[in-house]
Amino acid sequence: MIGIVILNYETWDATLRCIKSIEKTENTESVRVYLIDNASSSDMPVALKQYINDHDVVYISSNENRGYAAGNNLGIRKALEDQCGYILISNNDIVYKKDSIETMCEFLKEKHGGIVGPQVVDPQGKHQPSVAMVRTGMKEIFRFYTVLKCFQRKAMMKYQGMDQDAGGQYPVYHVSGCCFLMNRKAAETLYPLDENTFLYDEELIIGIRMEQAGLQTWYCGTAVVEHHHGYTTQKNSAFMQKCIRESEQYYCREYLQANGITLIFLNLYRKSLLVIRRLLKK
């Protein structure tokens, strides 16, 4: 059975759209959706309540919003308890194309991989960056996560795998946290996901943990999903920037063993960008 963990916060309409798109996919494996609500302040719409009652959906309501990893851990734990052989982690702003889940599942069976990520496209069908080809170390942080990326576009495209065939299949270092399928061995290895980040950099951490466990991560371009990116964060850019800073500090400190001076510099750089954006809006 494939357990599909979907994390919701406030955007119930996107969640219902996501779940309905899963219903339209074709799967030889049975599918069970685990819907996790991260302490939304708004009530669940009647349409979604009815859908849950009529379908095989396990609903779990968290008492507090502790972020991406903590929320997904609630679903992963229940899916493991239910003996799911595969677990799909999905943002609620993902829309699944026909055969996308089946294609990823069959790919993992064939390649004996631990994780596979699909090709991610925007609502207009344009291919989006969704992988990293190498480990994201301090060199990559400065080259591709600061203004320096503007001066080395070819290197960044190579880092993101954007120079590869979008419809191809190849090993990568990590895939996007918005949508990925893992087999039971990988799920048991990664569970619990590191809950010290609220939002952002989770996939970088997963990549390192997969490498440490000797498990392979793949990209499968023949499985396609549509991502309505930023659906839950675009209305709160200050909060988003705070999450980016805090996650980056934690990742660099705990997983890359960055020194104090480097961490201070990165923090000041991120804060200065926020000040500049605010000034430009005036």
Image: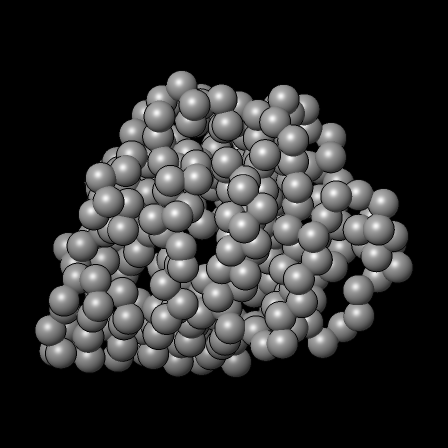
Residue 97 in percent (x, y) is at 64, 30
Q: Is residue 276 visible?
A: no
Residue 18 in percent (x, y) is at 69, 45
Residue 73 to residue 28: above or below: below
Residue 242 in percent (x, y) is at 42, 76
Say whether residue 35 is left or right of residue 210. Answer: right
The quadrant in which the N terminus is found is top right
Residue 117 to residue 108: above or below: below
Numbered circles on residues, count = 0
Residue 43 in percent (x, y) is at 80, 70
Say whether residue 211 is left or right of residue 72. Answer: left
Residue 52 to residue 247: above or below: above
Residue 228 to residue 268: above or below: above
Q: Report which quarter residue 253 is drawn in.
A: bottom left
Q: Residue at x 57, y 36 (%)?
A: 2
In terms of depth relative to the viewer, which is nearer, 157 or 223?
A: 223
Q: Residue at x 49, y 59 (%)?
A: 73
Say whether residue 264 is left or right of residue 60. Answer: left
In terms of depth relative to the viewer, which is nearer, 121 or 8?
A: 8
Q: Residue at x 37, y 71 (%)?
A: 196
Q: Is residue 239 visible?
A: yes
